[in-house]
Amino acid sequence: MALYLVSYDIAEQDKFEYKPLWGALNSIGAVRILYSEWVVVDQVGRAKAIYDSIAPLTLATDRLLVQEILVDASWDKLLISNADYQALLRHARR
């Protein structure tokens, strides 16, 4: 398994148009860790597939990144507890 970061920049005026994106992220088991960052556990080599499944739900002016997270991580003040994030990191590769 692998842990993926999904990160996006959306225009402030468009922030209320993203319920379908957030619903899609929830449906694939993603967890919101910061306002515009989510993590999801999936098989190794799935960054493009994750991207392809959610990119149509963003606007052409948005930015979107899906990238595997490695176990080497440091963080502060996430929207989830440190224990919950450490549990997710167990899926990250070394």
Image (cartoon, rainbow, N blue to C red):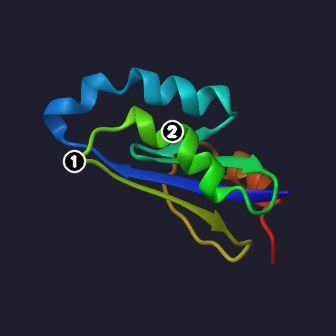
Q: Which mark is residue 43?
A: none
| Amino acid on which disc 1 is placed | Thr
Q: Residues within 10 Å of mark 2 (few under 14, many from 20)?
A: some
Mark 1 vs 2, N-terminal side: 2
Picture layout, residue 14 above or below residue 70: above
| Amino acid on which disc 2 is placed | Ile
Q: Which quadrant does the N terminus fall into?
A: bottom right
Query: Residue 78 vs residue 10: left or right?
Result: right
Residue 10 in picture, x, y percent from top left:
27, 44
Query: Which sits in the foreground, 5 or 32?
Result: 5
Q: Residues within 10 Å of mark 1 (few under 14, many from 20)?
A: few
Query: Residue 28 vs residue 77: left or right?
Result: right
* Residue at x-position 55% and y-position 46%: 52
> Which of the 4 quarters of the picture holds residue 67?
bottom right
* Residue at x-position 68% and y-position 33%: 28
Query: Which sits in the foreground, 50 or 8?
Result: 50
Q: Which residue is mark 2?
A: 54
Picture layout, residue 76 above or below residue 73: above
* Residue at x-position 59% and y-position 42%: 80
SS of the residue at dot 2? helix
Question: How many dots with numbers?
Answer: 2
Residue 68 in picture, x, y percent from top left:
65, 65
> Which of the 4 quarters of the picture holds residue 70?
bottom right
Q: Which mark is residue 61?
A: 1
Q: Which quadrant does the C terminus fall into?
A: bottom right
